[in-house]
Amino acid sequence: MGEDVAGDLHVTSRLVIPEAELRWRFSRSSGPGGQSVNTTDSRVELVWDAAASGVLSRTQRDRVLTRRPNGIFVVSASQQRSQWQNRREARSRLAQAIRSAVAAPPPSRRATRPSRGSVERRIAGKKRRGEIKRQRRTLDD
């Protein structure tokens, strides 16, 4: 993704999180990097409070708070050696998390009756299974 690590976060074409609402935290990361790991703050944590945000519509806020009751999104990234790459990764993960939280729920399934063929196949399978079990029985005279 060619997204920059600074500026507003473009979640969808209509939803843009202002940079002022994003909070960054940096810390030392474990993993690859050799001695550099012990001296650089390459681990990135990105926090966004949806409940306090002014960019969400009432519907979007309700969806987010239904799926995340506290409304706080926290994303961390520490896989890469550089802080810049981890920042890019954290931004894309946060955008994906917000996209899924704001998305409309899928349409509910309309209940339908099973087809006659599926019912007959189910019953035939049950009869076959019962016959197999019946053949295993020992006959005591």
Image (cartoon, rainbow, N blue to C red):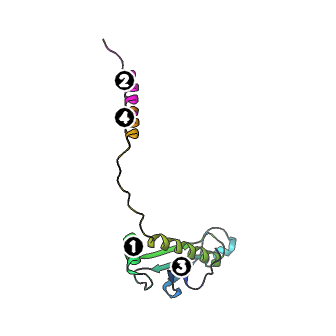
- The percent position of residue 80, horizontal first and vertical second, equals 64, 71
Q: Nearer the viewer, mark 1 or mark 3?
A: 3
Q: Amino acid at mark 1?
A: Arg
Which label belongs to residue 37? none
In the rendered structure, which disc, 1 or 3, sits on the residue that comes first in sequence?
3
In the rendered structure, which disc, 3 or 4, sits on the residue that comes first in sequence?
3
Q: Secondary structure at mark 4?
A: helix
**Magenta span of residues:** 125-140
In the rendered structure, which disc, 2 or 3, sits on the residue that comes first in sequence?
3
Write down the quadrant of residue 71 in the picture. bottom left
Please, what is the dominant secondary structure of the magenta stretch?
Answer: helix
Residue 32 part of the magenta-drawn span: no
- Residue located beneath label 4 in the image: 123
- Residue located beneath label 2 in the image: 134
Write down the quadrant of residue 134 in the picture. top left
Alpha carbon distance from label 3 to label 4: 52 Å
Q: Can see residue 33?
A: yes
Q: Amino acid at mark 3?
A: Ser
